Image: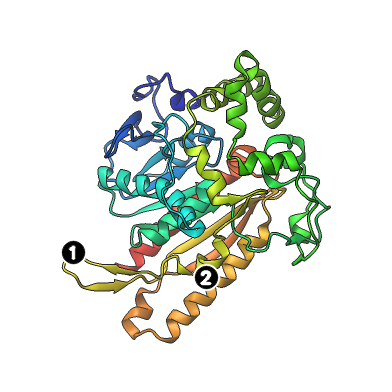
Amino acid sequence: MPHLREANDSITNIDTPERPDPYGTRVWRRTMVHLSGKNRALNEVTVERVGEKEEDALVMIHGYGAGLGFFYKNFEPISRMKGLKLYALDMLGCGNSSRPAFKIHAKKKEDQVMEAEGWFVDALEEWRKARKLEQFTLLGHSLGGYLAVSYAIKYPGRLKKLILASPVGIPSDPYAVNASMPEPNTSTIQNEIIQDQQSTTDQNGTLKKHKPASNVLRRPLPGWFVWLWDQNISPFSIVRMSGPLGPRFVSGWSFRRFNHLPQAESQALHDYSFSIFKQKGSGEYALAYILAPGAYARRPVIDRIQEVGRQTITKPDGTTVKENGIPVVFMYGENDWMDVAGGLASEEKLKEARQKALENATEEEKKRENGSAKVLLVPKAGHHLYLDNPEVFNDMIRKELEDTRKSEQKKQ
């Protein structure tokens, strides 16, 4: 089970492996990075290349119900890139990070959503300051992708590139359904729980036949599901309340979802998942504030994606400077239950924002313009594309990092 143990709670420090590293000496470490306030710390795994100048940093953040250990097939291949330091984080209140009490103080619904988002992204920004990272590439999966967008808008000027892997919360229309897809029996959150691996990795070409979404209504969600959601009762609460039956509940999901993996890896992921699920509830309670039942965002990404890379930054001396755009990459599995239409629509809005910026730009601003957007599909993969087809996923990520470096070198 290479590199899964590195993310496990029992590992406190990961040093250079005893055997020679054909890609250069690398040091693996796990650290708890303490933040301000009571019981606030982020669990961090880093892969650092020894004896090389650190040119780039990649920060990876996980999705709902996951942890940085889910990226175990990505750490080693991606960190082969010279001059790269890789960081993987458990978001505040998730994985093996600290789990402070989650409380919302805002009264208005929109303010509650923004406060819930801020609970995560403010911790990420505080971590960045602690690590003295001026700029970095941010990769977020699922809910991590949604939060990555929120971070890019709230804390401008810090990202070299934004990579969104099957991001949740893009569409604004809860009735939008891909007309070329079979009518879904379940919501996206339910899909995350019941979908098996075979259905995510078989090549069916569904996304290649993609058509614009129609206004056909999805089948209604079960009443019990909506009630639990509105009561902010998470699936993990049920696992914790089930006592000795908890591992059995988790195994029904984990073994079905990871049945394509070797038995030892599947078992390790099951144990890792259960170790996360059984911990004190914290960050999971933010989900009901951020997403409506069925995984539609209460503050959809599509309504604000054009703001990424277009914020005004106030410098320490009080002067202001406007961002010149950043590259944004959307990645989906070929058989992803997260609708690629959201990524395609976001790509168009980002391109429109770039065109608008260029129309009013000075010659100097045109030279500095850096905005771009594209959508990539990972074959034989579903929502967990980084785990379903890690070889292709890792190659794509390395290429994106290399492209960013080349672009920077041209501007020097």
Q: Which residue is more in the foreground, 159 or 79?
A: 159
Sequence-earlier tag: 2 or 1? 1
Label 2 residue SS: helix
Q: Locate residue 333, reporting x and y percent.
A: 66, 48
Q: Locate residue 387, reporting x and y percent.
A: 60, 37
Dot 2 corresponds to which residue? 350
Q: Locate residue 343, reporting x and y percent.
A: 61, 61
Label 1 residue SS: loop
Dot 1 corresponds to which residue? 316
Q: Which residue is more in the foreground, 211 or 93?
A: 93
Residue at the extreme left: 317
Is 38 placed left or right of 197 in the picture?
A: left
Tell me the amino acid under the disc marked 1. Pro
Q: Is residue 54 visible?
A: yes
Q: Locate residue 283, reporting x and y percent.
A: 47, 38
Image point (41%, 58%), residue name:
152
